[in-house]
Amino acid sequence: MKTLFSFLAALVLSISYVFSADYTLRLDYIFSGDATHTEISLAKMGRLEGWWGRTVNMDNLLLRGNGQIILRDSATSQVLYCTSFSTLFSEWQCTPEALHTRKAFENVYLVPMPQATAYVTVNILDKRDSITASMTHIVHPDDILIRPAASPYTLDKCRYVHKGGDSKDAIDIAIVGEGYTKEEMEVFYRDAKETADQILSYEPFKGKADKLNFIAVPVESKESGVSIPLKGEWKQTAFSSHFSTFYSDRYLTTLHLFDLHDALASVPYEHIIILANTDNYGGGGILNSYVLTAAHNRWAMPVVVHEFGHSFAGLADEYFYDDGTDQYDLNTEPWEPNITTLIGFKSKWEDMIEKKEIVTKSDQKFPAYTTLVESDYKVGIYEGGGYLSEGIYRPFPTCRMRDNTYPLFCPVCQRAISRMIDYQTIQLPE
Ligand SMILES: [Zn+2]
């Protein structure tokens, strides 16, 4: 016991020594370029009260992501904190528009405020896992231009729709409204509560509910609803979101990340769910960035859980098309835990199967799932996933990451989510 106590005391001491535990450093970047060029620029830095992110596993990554932020002490080069992310910019680089146009995208990341001068490195990786752009800049914690951030949406104006534990120990997930007017705030609170309840009805979120906080932040929009370009409808909303992102009708996103984080500056938050006040179908989720989903249609709640799988745990889409996109390189193992090209299958779910046998597309005749406990489905290697019907494999016949009607995450996705919750809340062995 004494040894454990000494270890914990040393850990607490080392965390408080290198960080100012009372502040978060907000880093605002612009990622810009086209299909083949990427540039990273620092836009500004801010200081937020409190540090609500993880205080364990600070110097290692659970997922590679499409990009990484690494904070290093300037004197020793020791990694103080690192995190990974995906960005809408990388998705856009795969679109036809990027072949002839340069565009710029806002991105925001939160790291603990260092106590001494530090360096921040931002890396962006392509689908072959090669770094396409890297930028390192200095941070002086006493820099007078690091702006103290604050928002009118203070904690006393928000509502916890689920509180698993103290913010220092639990993972804080902010739910914000997009396209809800002042008069529609009770509708927003109802939607936020339903969202939290839905996510917590799925394992492993259900079993680890005491590790999760959901806080509803009542952000007001001038107009009700969100922009639907296909119908020529444009609305004045808090985060200027719209459907038809990259000309894909159902893809609902916001490009206004600075506004989004400004609204959240006075509440504890580590993950963001944006609920859009519309009955149009759609949404999107980006690792360590946000989920944005339409709140009022038949599939709204399954979709928000699916998108949260992307943004929270970095899960890939397990669905596919015969004429799918080439978002993944078939000679590289994707970093998402629930798909594989078999290049690096050992790092995936090899330990969860008895025989390394591929179930080809033509062999896939599954019994219908009637009751969940009686499911005959088994973890295996099923052809089709990550938008491609060949060359990429998923672990289970179906999953919340494949089908809106299937009411579970598959065993591999459940393990990945569980690992992510542990990574953020428990010190894991090196
Ligand atoms: Zn799955």
Image (cartoon, rainbow, N blue to C red):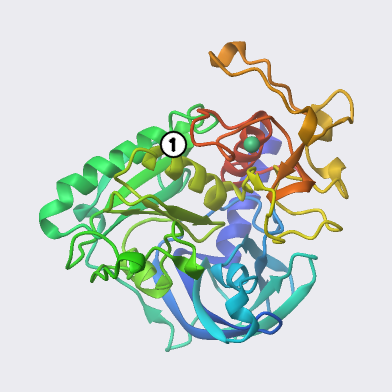
Q: Position of residue 259 (x, y in %)?
A: 35, 73
Q: Residue furthest top?
A: 374
Picture coordinates of residue 207 (x, y %)?
A: 51, 26
**Picture quadrant where residue 7 is located:** top right
Q: From the viewer's perspective, is residue 335 above or below residue 421?
A: below
- The residue that label 1 is drawn on is 199
Q: Residue at x 74, y 27 (%)?
A: 379
Where residue 337 appears, as percent x and y from the top left, is 71, 45
Residue visible at 40% across and 74% down in the picture: 258
Side of 419 relative to 384 (left or right): left
When the figure is inspected, residue 137 is found, relative to residue 114, above or below; the finding is below
Dot 1: within a 10 Å radius of its alpha carbon, few (fewer than 14), some, or many (20 or more) residues? Answer: many
**Residue 308: image x %, image y %?**
49, 46
Residue type at mark 1: give it: Ile
- Relative placement, left or right, of 337 versus 146 is right
Q: Residue drawn 42% across and 88% down?
A: 144
- Count numbered badges in the picture: 1
Give the position of the N terminus as an image quadrant: top right
Residue sitting nearer the eye, 286 or 173: 286
In this rendering, the answer to whether 228 lies above or below 139 is above
